[in-house]
């Protein structure tokens, strides 16, 4: 087994070689987004509450100076997971039909294990439900059975620059517009976040 210092030096050298070539297209992973949508189109459809999963690789430009996937990049790659899920549950087609968009209104993330450059990981995304205004999803990146990070997201569908009513979106998806019971931990987070002052007092 190679010494840890040697592995770190090798990864750092590979990062340095790739930074210049990758500097332009890496702000947002547009190519990976197209590949993700293509992959999702070829995958079997999912039920609304099924868990979507697909594999990705940590690229050199996903890493920061500590030679691990940057926390901000993790949030960006979570976008890919939500797009992948939206195709497989049929939401993507409804977005195109109605000229709707998607927006993230809040999130809570736990980081537990590092993901290093060139390591493979599995992205998992699941739709949890909705309340009177927002839709809730959970996402995680896994290496084997280990969850490296996990996010709870409050999201919305936009119509003409404003949030579309959740009932309208639910009907377009062919499901009852009545909000389902959210898991206790999701409801507790939403209730706690509602007490947060806005605008902030900075």
Image (spheres, rainbow, N blue to C red):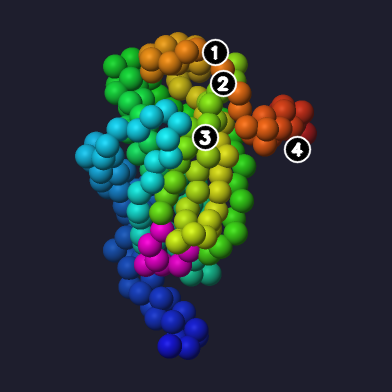
- Residue 63: image x %, image y %? 45, 63
| Circle on res. 202 | 4
Discs 3/2, front: 2
Q: In this view, does 132 lie above or below 66?
A: above
Q: Earlier in the sequence, mark 2 or mark 4?
A: 2
Q: Earlier in the sequence, mark 4 or mark 1?
A: 1
Q: Is mark 2 on a helix, strand or loop?
A: loop
Circle 3 residue: 137
Q: What's the residue at 30%, 33% (across, down)? A: 45
Crowd rating for badge 4 (residues with CA inside 10 Å; few <14, some 14–19, many 20+): few
Residue 131 falls in image quadrant: top right
Distance between mark 3 and mark 1 Cα atoms: 17 Å
Q: Can residue 189 be seen in this view?
A: yes
Q: What's the residue at 42%, 49% (across, down)? A: 123
Crowd rating for badge 3 (residues with CA inside 10 Å; few <14, some 14–19, many 20+): some
In the image, the segment drawn in magenta is 115-121
Distance between mark 1 and mark 2 Cα atoms: 6 Å
């Amino acid at each position: 087994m190679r010494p840890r210092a040697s592995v770190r030096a090798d990864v750092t050298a590979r990062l340095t070689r790739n930074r210049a070539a990758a500097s332009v297209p890496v702000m947002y992973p547009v190519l990976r987004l197209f590949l993700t949508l293509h992959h999702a189109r070829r995958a079997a459809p999912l039920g609304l509450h099924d868990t979507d999963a697909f594999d990705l690789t940590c690229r050199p430009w996903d890493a920061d100076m500590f030679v691990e996937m940057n926390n901000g990049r993790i949030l960006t790659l979570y976008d890919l997971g939500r797009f992948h899920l939206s195709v497989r549950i049929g939401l993507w087609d409804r977005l195109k039909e109605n000229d709707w968009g998607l927006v993230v209104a809040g999130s809570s993330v736990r980081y537990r294990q590092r993901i290093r450059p060139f390591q493979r990981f599995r992205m998992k995304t699941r739709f949890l439900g909705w309340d009177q205004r927002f839709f809730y999803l959970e996402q995680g990146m896994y290496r084997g059975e280990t969850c490296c990070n996990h996010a709870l997201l409050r999201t919305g569908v936009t119509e003409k620059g404003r949030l579309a009513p959740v009932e309208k979106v639910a009907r377009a998806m062919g499901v009852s517009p009545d909000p389902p019971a959210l898991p206790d931990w999701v409801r507790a987070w939403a209730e706690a976040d509602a007490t947060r002052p806005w605008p902030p007092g900075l």
